[in-house]
Image: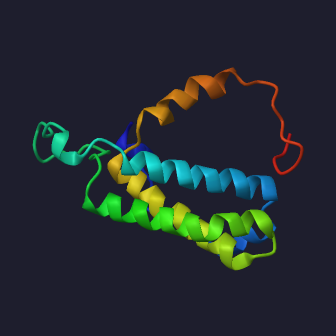
Amino acid sequence: ASASLCPTMAIVDPRVVETMPMTVAASSGFDVLCHAIESYTARPFTKRPPAEPKHIRPLNQGANPYSDFACREALRICGRFFERVLQDESDMEARQQMMWASTIVGTAMGNAGVAVPHGLSYPVCGHVKEFVPENGYPK
C-alpha cells in the first residue's frame, strides 16, 4: 500500500450512528470485531525484518505493544456493547461505544496490519454480484 493512502486525520462524529440502520450497525460491529482479532493475531513486529533503509518505516509494523493494547480495548468494548447495539437500536451509548471501538481498532490495524483472512475476503467479495441486503444499504 502507498503512504499516500494513509489518512492524516479522521472526523469521528457520534451523530453519524444515530440514524444508522440496524443491518449497517451489525455489519460495522462485526467489522470491528474481526479487525481487532486480526490485528491482535498479526505477526509480531519483532519477527519482521528491519526496513531498508532503516529510517523508512513500513506502513504495517506487525503486532506491537500499542496495537495489542488497542485491540484488547476494542474487544472489551465489543464484549460489553455489541450485543446491546443488536438488541436495541435506540441505545446511543452502545452505538457510540462501538464507534469508539472502530476508531481505536482502526489505528491498531493501520499500525499492526491484519492477518490472512483479511486478504482472503477480497477475491470472495469480488465474486458476489447479486447480494443486496433487505434494508440498510442503498441499492
**With 88 as the anchor, is 33 left or right in this view?**
left
Position in image of residue 24 (x %, y %) = 75, 54
Q: Quadrant of the C terminus?
A: top right
Position in image of residue 102 (x %, y %) = 54, 61
Q: Which residue is at 56% across, 31% downward? A: 121
- The residue lying toward the viewer, choosing from 123 and 30, is 30
Residue 45 lies, with reference to residue 65, above or below; the image says above
Residue located farthest toward the bottom when viewing the structure as drawn: 93
- The residue lying toward the viewer, choosing from 85 and 45, is 85
**With 69 as the anchor, is 100 left or right in this view?**
right
Q: Which residue is at 77% across, 71% downward? A: 18
Residue 105 shows in this picture: yes
Residue located farthest toward the right when viewing the structure as drawn: 134
Total numbered circles: 0
**With 99 as the anchor, is 108 left or right in this view?**
left
- The residue lying toward the viewer, choosing from 118 and 17, is 118
Residue 119 lies, with reference to residue 22, above or below; the image says above
Q: Which residue is at 12% across, 40% downward? A: 50
Position in image of residue 76 (x %, y %) = 49, 67
